[in-house]
């Protein structure tokens, strides 16, 4: 159950188009959309639903974020990584979460903070849960596939162009970590699946 569904009944969120059921998400997914991307989330800035299938064929770095964490400075490195490799097919996806009690602001406050403090341009989504039974279906799936749920903010999951989980990285792994950058470059060198 995500943050929105704690405040509003699931049926109301689905009726408003802010949340799709897993079956509806799968039914709406293009045939070439990998299972890991068959999820929709409200965009951080305006809460308009966004399908992650739009990132099919890209190398995806999924990161749970927070504005008041010792690792918050990683926003700068994530934006630099995104700017450096986006034209080659990398996308960084940020998912703010208060699971570790360091993201208490509203979606608008988070969006303003990210843009004004770090110039974040990579896609960010509305605040949601990333661990335990309350985790969004995406983070439940990533934890299951990788064997690791986020233990803190700025945990990273790297997905190849085929949507498969390549690896995951702890909060201690900075965006400019040589091993992470090498893994990203290796995935970017692979052809887009047909």
Image (cartoon, rainbow, N blue to C red):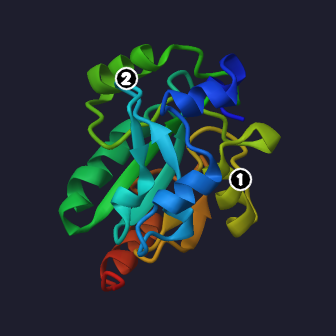
Residue 159, image x and y in percent?
A: 49, 67
- The quadrant the C terminus occupies is bottom left
Task: State which quadrant residue 164 falls in.
Answer: bottom right
Foreground of the two, 110 or 134? 134
Residue 128, which numbered label? none
Q: Can residue 70 be spotted in the picture?
A: no
User: In the rendered view of the protein, which quadrant contains the N terminus?
Assistant: top right
- Residue at 38% across, 31% down: 48
Q: Which residue is identified by label 1?
A: 140
Closer to the camera in the image, 1 or 100? 1
Q: Which residue is drawn at 69% across and 68% down?
A: 145
Spot occupied by residue 84 in the image (x, y as percentages of width and height): 22, 57
Q: Residue furthest right?
A: 133
Dot 1 lies on which element? helix
| Residue 37 versus residue 42 in the image, above or below | below
- Left or right of residue 133: residue 155: left
Q: Residue at x 27, y 67 (%)?
A: 89
Q: What is the total number of numbered labels drawn onto the structure image? A: 2
Q: Mark 2 points at which residue?
A: 111
What is the distance, in whole Å, between disc 1 and disc 2 at their CAs? 24 Å
The reply, left or right, for residue 35 in relation to residue 139 is left
Q: Would residue 57 appear left or right of 155 to someone viewing this image?
A: left
- Give above or below for 144 relative to 39: below
Q: Position of residue 191 (x, y in %)?
A: 30, 85
- The residue lying furthest to the left in this view is 87
Labels 1 and 2: the sequence-earlier one:
2
Q: Which residue is drawn at 66% across and 33% down?
A: 2
- Local SS, label 2: helix
Query: Circle 2: is it few (<14), some (14-19), or many (20+) Cα within 10 Å?
Result: many
Q: Position of residue 82 (x, y in %)?
A: 29, 52
Count neighbours of disc 1 (C-alpha within 10 A) and say few if under 14, some if 14 to 19, many if 20 or more. Answer: some
Q: Which of marks 1 and 2 is in front?
A: 1
């Amino acid at each position: 159950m995500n943050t929105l569904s704690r405040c509003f009944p699931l049926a109301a969120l689905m009726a408003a188009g802010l949340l799709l059921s897993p079956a509806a998400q799968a039914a709406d997914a293009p045939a070439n959309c990998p299972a890991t991307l068959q999820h929709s989330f409200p965009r951080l800035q305006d809460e308009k639903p966004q399908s992650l299938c739009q990132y099919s064929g890209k190398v995806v770095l999924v990161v749970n974020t927070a504005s008041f964490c010792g690792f918050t400075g990683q926003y700068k490195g994530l934006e630099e990584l995104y700017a450096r490799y986006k034209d080659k097919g990398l996308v960084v996806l940020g998912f703010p979460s208060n699971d570790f009690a360091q993201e208490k602001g509203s979606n608008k406050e988070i969006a303003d903070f990210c843009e004004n403090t770090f110039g974040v341009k990579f896609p960010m989504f509305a605040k949601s849960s990333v661990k335990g039974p309350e985790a969004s279906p995406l983070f439940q799936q990533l934890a299951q596939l990788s064997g690791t749920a986020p233990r803190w903010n700025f945990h990273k999951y790297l997905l190849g162009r085929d949507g498969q989980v390549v690896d995951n990285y702890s909060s201690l792994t900075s965006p400019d970590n040589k091993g992470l950058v090498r893994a990203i470059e290796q995935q970017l060198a692979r052809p887009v699946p047909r």
